[in-house]
Amino acid sequence: MRTLFKTSYDADINLFRDGRHAMWYGLLLAIAIVLPFVLGDFELGEVAHVLIWAIAGMGLMILVGQTGQPSLGHASFLAVGCYANVILQNDYGVPFILSLPIAGLIAGLAGVAIALPTSRLHGIYLGIATLAVSVLTGDLIVIAEPVTKGVFGLYAPQITIFGITIDRYGNPDRFYWLILAVTVIVVLLYKNLLRSPLGRSFAAVRDSEVSARAMGVNIPRTKAVSFGLSAGITGIAGALMGHYTGIFNNETFNLIMSIQLLLMIVIGGLGSIHGAFFGAIVVALLPQAIVFVRDTVSAVAGTSSVAIPGMETAIFGIILVVFILFEPMGIYGRWVKIRTWFELFPFARRDMFRRQRSYLKTERMR
């Protein structure tokens, strides 16, 4: 059994818990670097798709997993980041290396603008408010037709960085390197945020707003900052998603995508970077898995392949129900239990993972 002894508070705020933790992160990065040399163009494009969804998941995870504020409208911030990035490049000639962070900043400001009037809402009421934002986004894109081209949509230009052309289809390996670099930056930002005073304020608001207020945390400001950071990172993912798809319009970032984002981090595991990546794997690769299984069954049965409308949504819903019933902590929670069982063997017991219905007494005052 491996035991980690802590001799100072620095152990709780270090970037990595210990050397073994840093080694695993380094190994994952090494695998990501090797992938372009062993995968084909199609497989590499799917991995890039997973990473884009993981960036969006980490953005939403800051708000839902770390601050405890539910959101059903984050597809709106994907749209803001996507449209801002392409409009800046096409209409104003801003290079991609500047348009990407500016698009994230614009999406972050949009998140703050939504957070200010909704800072006093909780639970289902906040979810409904963000749901309304997601529903209105498509209409706003159509209304702003002179800028957004409405239902006709926009085409994402080729990316040029220091004279190097990057295209999703022309050179998918370069596009993958770009996505990987942005992913690493977002992961480092996320991990540093968690160990900062601001990240601890997020956790305090999530666990108990009454207790957080008693400790001097400014609740409205903390929620607004959380919304802004969450929307900003999600906006960056939206900008990258625009270059991945190549063309998009008012129907691209719809309500279904907002729900998918929320369900993705629930399935992956709330409150962890790993959960965003696990959920992204499910969301990004599920359509391909459905097509593969459908074609395989058709080939074995000797019949033609028939696409069933709504199959992807139905399977995704079934997966969500299974996790809520049997593993509310998500895929990462299940992995932690398996790892802990092996670390404590032969002293591990099933009851050690039993959920307890407990809450802070201060929450009764909310």
Image (tube, rainbow, N blue to C red):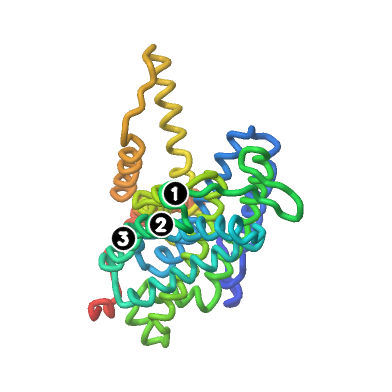
Q: Earlier in the sequence, mark 2 or mark 1?
A: 2
Q: Residues within 10 Å of mark 2 (few under 14, many from 20)?
A: many
Looking at the image, the residue that sits furthest to the right is 163
Q: Residue 249 shows which numbered tag?
A: 1
Kindly identify the residue that appears in the image at 35 percent across and 42 percent down.
Answer: 316
How far from the left and from the top, in percent, is residue 134?
Answer: 35, 58
339 displayed left or right of 354: right
Q: In x, y percent, where is residue 135?
A: 32, 57
* Label 3 SS: helix
Residue marked by disc 2: 141
- Quick one: 212 or 76, which is closer to the camera? 76
Residue at x-position 31% and y-position 60%: 131
- For this view, does 193 lie left or right of residue 266? right
> The N terminus appears in which quarter of the rendering?
bottom right
Q: Quadrant of the C terminus?
A: bottom left
Find residue 131 and name its label.
Answer: 3
Q: x, y (%) of residue 280?
A: 48, 48
Task: Name which residue type carries label 1.
Answer: Asn
Q: Secondary structure at mark 1?
A: loop
Q: Is residue 117 above or below residue 30?
A: below
Using the image as rendered, state which of residue 195 and residue 351 is in the foreground: 195
Amino acid bearing label 3: Leu
